[in-house]
Image (cartoon, grey):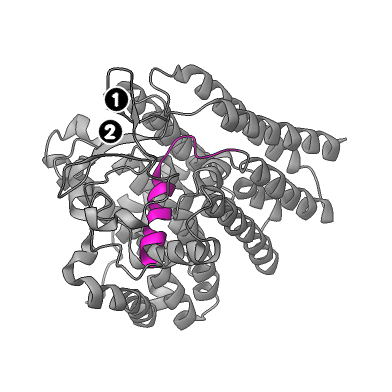
Amino acid sequence: MRIFLITALLVLSAALTAFGIVLFDLFEPGRDRVQIVLVTSALWLLFGLAWWLLRRVNGRAVVALVLAGSALIGGAALVGPPNTSTDSARYAWDGIVQNNGISPYAYTPADDRLDSLRPDWLFPPTQTTANGKEVCVGERIARAHKTDSGELFCSALNRTAVPTIYPPASEIYFAGVRFLTGPGPQYWPLQLTGLFLSFGTTLMLLAGMRRRGLDQRNAALWAWCPLVATEAITNSHVDMLGVIFVVAAVFLISTKRVWRGGLLLGIAIGTKLIPVLAAPALLRRGGWRMVAASILSFALLYVPYVLATGIGVLGYLPGYLSEEGYEDGSRFALVSLVAPGASAVIVAGLILLVVAILVIAKTDQNKPWVGQLVMIGATLLVLSPRYPWYALLLVPFVALSGRWEWLLVPMALTLRLLVPSVPLTRASIAIAVIVIVAVSLRRAGPGALKRMVSRRRQPAPATPN
């Protein structure tokens, strides 16, 4: 009966995933976001119920259900184009540019010199209205002007006037996908690749959990998670590439294969920089060898692009950080309540420094995923980005540790994207913090807080004369 109910919930989740992708997106002007919020909430509820029921299933059925759900929900996420982000359009363009022998850091998409490379699905022609005005038509299509001529053009890309922001591992990935498909296919090549990567991560988690005696049922916390279907597959965010390299690196380093794990960690960091948050929990086991291997692979990825573009490989990263409010502190939802303005940056930095020191000192090097969960989760709570796909990096460590309460972090960030309200964001992140702390104390057992306080109050042992 439990297996039947779980199967029904997974089928319903897949159907609702497809329904939401086909009918709802954030691109239509004036779109009522209530419907999107309701569908998203229902998906998280179905996910929670299915995982709760799975906890009472044993044997080979667990692996079969986890894999079936990953494939079924992931496949449903392929039914339509991206519905909350236009980032994958930029991924496709960067790949097309590279396969024509041009560095993605050299020119902006608005540069007139790239006119011959523009496919119509990314840069549809303008249309002329009855009164002779040129307009751009389409939900994902925005108006832009070319750099030199000032000519109007239509684009599915965001930020057409700035160079790419993505590090070299991502750019190699974009070029590889477009090398196989050419410039013609639209969004599905990256979506299909996202499905392969997310399913591959499911397989890796199941295998790694079995070898380490961890509960394989918790792999469903990754495999069935609505965030994975939406952001790794439908919106095909490149963060997914970083996730699979990080998980592989963690398994290698935790079993003392430090050089290989360090190389993979460097590639993960070369995907989108954020995976560096997984490093503190591995430092005591990996040491200088992990750091050296990571720096080596990271640097080697940059070599061809530095030779082609020089310092231009920084792309739009500095401008992006300023645009997102991380320079003046306006982006920090909770920290800005107690440290307004630029002081929020200092306070946030100090909080994360303390967390990193504690993670380095306290993490069990044979099971580093709890430390990584805390480091990544705390960073997301403090920085509170408006993009939930940053939390993809958190989810595999939720699965490895079984600490489901940390899923409130991606839920809060998803709500921030769908309903961009500062008070609501602060409330949702505060609730996440309270629940995480409360459940963590409960996991530690009764009297955990009292034991911590009593240990701090114990006098130091007397030293002999």
Q: Where residue 418 sits: x, y (%)?
A: 42, 27
Q: Where residue 140 sits: x, y (%)?
A: 41, 34
Instruction: Give the main secondary structure of the magenta stretch.
Output: helix
Residue drawn at point x = 59 percent, y = 42 percent: 225
View extreme (right): residue: 1
Find the magenta span and give its range: 80-98
Q: Which residue is mark 2?
A: 333
Decide if residue 16 is on the left or right side of residue 164.
right
Q: Where residue 223 sits: x, y (%)?
A: 64, 49
User: Which quadrant of the view contains residue 9?
Assistant: top right
Q: What secondary structure is found at the residue carrying circle 1?
A: helix
User: Which quadrant of the view contains residue 45?
Assistant: top right
Decide if residue 461 is on the left or right side of residue 62.
left
Residue 465 vs residue 231, the one in the foreground: 231
Q: What secondary structure is found at the residue carrying circle 2?
A: loop
Q: Are marks 1 and 2 in contact (CB under 8 Å)?
A: yes
Residue drawn at point x = 78 percent, y = 42 percent: 56
Task: Kindly tell me whether residue 279 is visible in this rendering.
Answer: no
Q: Earlier in the sequence, mark 1 or mark 2?
A: 2
Which numbered disc covers residue 422?
1
- Give the amino acid at mark 2: Ala
Magenta region includes residue 349: no
For the N terminus, the quadrant is top right
Image: 329 above or below 266: above
Few, some or many C-alpha atoms within 10 Å of disc 1 (few <14, some 14-19, many ≥20)?
few
